[in-house]
Each structure stands twice: as C-alpha cells, then as structure tokens.
Image (cartoon, helix red, strand yellow):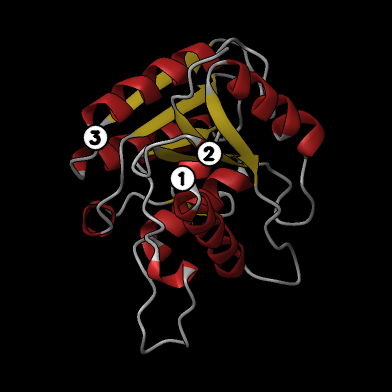
Amino acid sequence: NVEIKGAVLICACGAFQYHSDWNEGSPVAEELSKLGYQSFVVDYRLQPYTQEEGALDLARAVRFVRYHAQEYGIDEQDIAVMGFSAGGILAGEMLHNFDGTVSPNVLDLDELDEVSADAAADGMIYSFYGRLSVGTNDVESLREADLPPTFYCYGTRDPFYEQFLSNADAVEKAGVKVERLQLDEMHHGFGDQGGWMDEFDQFLEQVFDEN
C-alpha cells in the first residue's frame, strides 16, 4: 500500500476551449496517485464562460476535497493545486482572487462555502500567474495575493519560455518560495513526459512537511 501524502487538484490545458485530459489530466493523476497523492482532475467551465468562472470551479473543488479530507485520508492542510498552460493560469487566478472563504455578503452560504479554498502549494507546468498568453510581473499584486510555494516546470523550446522566467522572478520577489525545473529542448505541451513529477513530488513533500 502507498502512504497517502496529501491531495492534488489538476487543471489540464486547452486554452479555455477544451480539456486536454488525455495528455495533462488522467495520466498525471494516475502517476501522482502512484506517488501517494489523492488526485483529482478538475472539470472546470470553458468558453463561453470566463477564466474567473473556471477559477471559481477550482475553488469549489478545493473546498470539496478539504470538506471530505478525513474520508480521503489526508490532512486538510495538505492540498495542492496545479495546472498546465491555461490550466495553470486558471489555478493562479483562483489563488490570486478566489481562495480563502466566501463572504456572506456575496451569496447565500452553503456548507462548502464556509470551507477555505486555500492551497498549500501550486504547480505551474509550462504556465504562469496572469492571463491567457500574458504573465504578470506586478510584484506588489503578487505579494498582496499571499501566494503559496510555487513549482515551475518549463522547456527551453517553449515559445513562452521568457515569460516563465520573468513571472517566476516576480513571484520570488514577492516573497513566495519558488522552485524551478527547466527541461532542455522541451517544447510546450509535454504533459506527463520529461521526468518532472519526481521533483514535483519532492517539492510537495517538503511543503506539506512544513505545514
């Protein structure tokens, strides 16, 4: 039996038009499960819905997992989110604007709304905090968001390579713990390939141990 280390919620890519589950969803969840994580692929809303509405879906999913933490055999603090390309942007949107709890002034609360959507860690796999195709370098905004430790993984042949570097720099300047893994000659969209999940596993173990 594999010891359960925590939970990871996965957001696949697809430019907010589809979910690339075959490459960045189920295979990643299966591998992370082998490493000891309760793994969930988030079926977030796509166009015509907005990035913000998709982020609310992820926040709701985090609340659901935390609410059922005992049933899943995890510590309620040991929950991470991650995403690939647009899925990572979605995770960043949630962490930047929609984590914590829902204000009772916004809507009628149910049991899940009273549970925090905070995540202990974030995995940005060929992705960044920002909007579709545009990473943010606004250090003050990133600092105010109180982001969790963030793991970046990207290939040197990715057209967004320079944006990954500059966004990771800005997040680090904002006081966030950042770990980077660069894969030489890798293009955008490598999914579960490249051997990065072992290092992501080590990153999560360290973060969860420090909680």
* Residue linked to disc 1: 69
* Mark 3 to mark 2 CA distance (whole Å): 18 Å
Q: With respect to residue 156, does 160 lie above or below?
A: below
The answer to which image quadrant residue 1 occupies is top right
**Residue at the (41%, 58%) spot, across then down:** 117
Q: Mark 1 packing: few (<14 Cα in 10 Å), some, or many (20+)?
A: some
Answer whether residue 174 is visible to the viewer in this image. yes
Tag 3: residue type? Asn
Query: Circle 3 is placed at which residue position?
Result: 211
Q: Is residue 170 left or right of residue 91?
A: left
Q: Find out whether the residues at labels 3 and 1 contact each other: C-beta distance under 8 Å.
A: no
Q: Secondary structure at mark 2?
A: helix
Residue behind mark 2: 72
Q: Quadrant location of the C terminus?
A: top left
Q: Amino acid at mark 1?
A: Ala
Density class for disc 3 (Cα within 10 Å; few <14, some 14-19, many ≥20) is few
